[in-house]
Image (cartoon, rainbow, N blue to C red):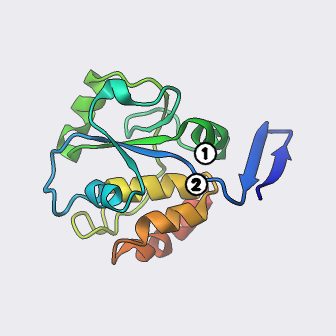
Amino acid sequence: MAHFIYFASQGILLMSGEDKVALYVLMMEECDPDKCTANKLVKFNLVKPIYRVKEVPRNCVVLNPLADVILSIKDRTTALRHGILAVDCSWKNAEDFFNRVRIKGSHRRLPRLIAVNPINFGNPYILSTAEALAASLYILGFEDQAREALSIFKWGPHFFEVNKWLLEQH
């Protein structure tokens, strides 16, 4: 059973209980398949893979490192209704991709967070796809789903320890 809390001043409807956000990953297949966190999320049925931009659900929250607006609790209802999309591409190609390709939706960037994945450990902003999705879920109030997404990685729980203060500021 879901519980509802409405914050009239901000126009935000919070729901808890069985609610889960649909997670999508646009798979650009640019990284080592064995190290790709998106591939592992797909393998464990935690995200739906998308292979063409035209398949992206309309109105979803698009995680975009170039977006002007930072993801916040105000995006919760949109995420719950339409899902969250992460683009799994190389960080070397991300700027070019987001400047070249138009994806419909609410483009949001994440706040400054520290990567704990083995590839980019300790680097601010350079998150893996799994870290980005988990961070967005946590910020939007879906902490259980965020922890579930990273539970399949040995380093997953450490992400929340390292970024606890930063995540809770949003």
Residue 31 lies, in percent from the top left, at 15, 51
Local crowd size for mark 2, using a 10 Å CA cut-off: few (<14), some (14–19), many (≥20): many
Q: Looking at the image, is mark 2 or mark 1 earlier in the sequence?
A: 1
Residue identified by numbered label 1: 72
The amino acid marked with disc number 2 is: Ile
Residue 87 lies, in percent from the top left, at 32, 41
Task: Say which mark, if any, is on residue 117.
Answer: none
The amino acid marked with disc number 1 is: Ser
Q: Quadrant of the N terminus?
A: bottom right
Q: Is residue 53 above or below residue 3?
A: above
Q: Residue furthest right?
A: 8
Residue 109 lies, in percent from the top left, at 45, 41
Separation (CA) of disc 2 from disc 1:
6 Å
Local crowd size for mark 1, using a 10 Å CA cut-off: few (<14), some (14–19), many (≥20): some
Query: Residue 66 occupies which quadrant of the picture?
Result: top left
Q: Is residue 148 left or right of residue 27?
A: right
Task: Say whether marks 2 and 1 touch (CB < 8 Å).
Answer: yes
Q: Is residue 141 left or right of residue 64?
A: right
Query: Residue 52 occupies which quadrant of the picture?
Result: top left
Q: Is residue 115 above or below residue 64?
A: below
Q: Residue at x 22, y 40 (%)?
A: 28
Q: Is residue 125 visible?
A: no
Task: Say which mark, if any, is on residue 139.
Answer: 2
Q: Residue at x 59, y 53 (%)?
A: 20
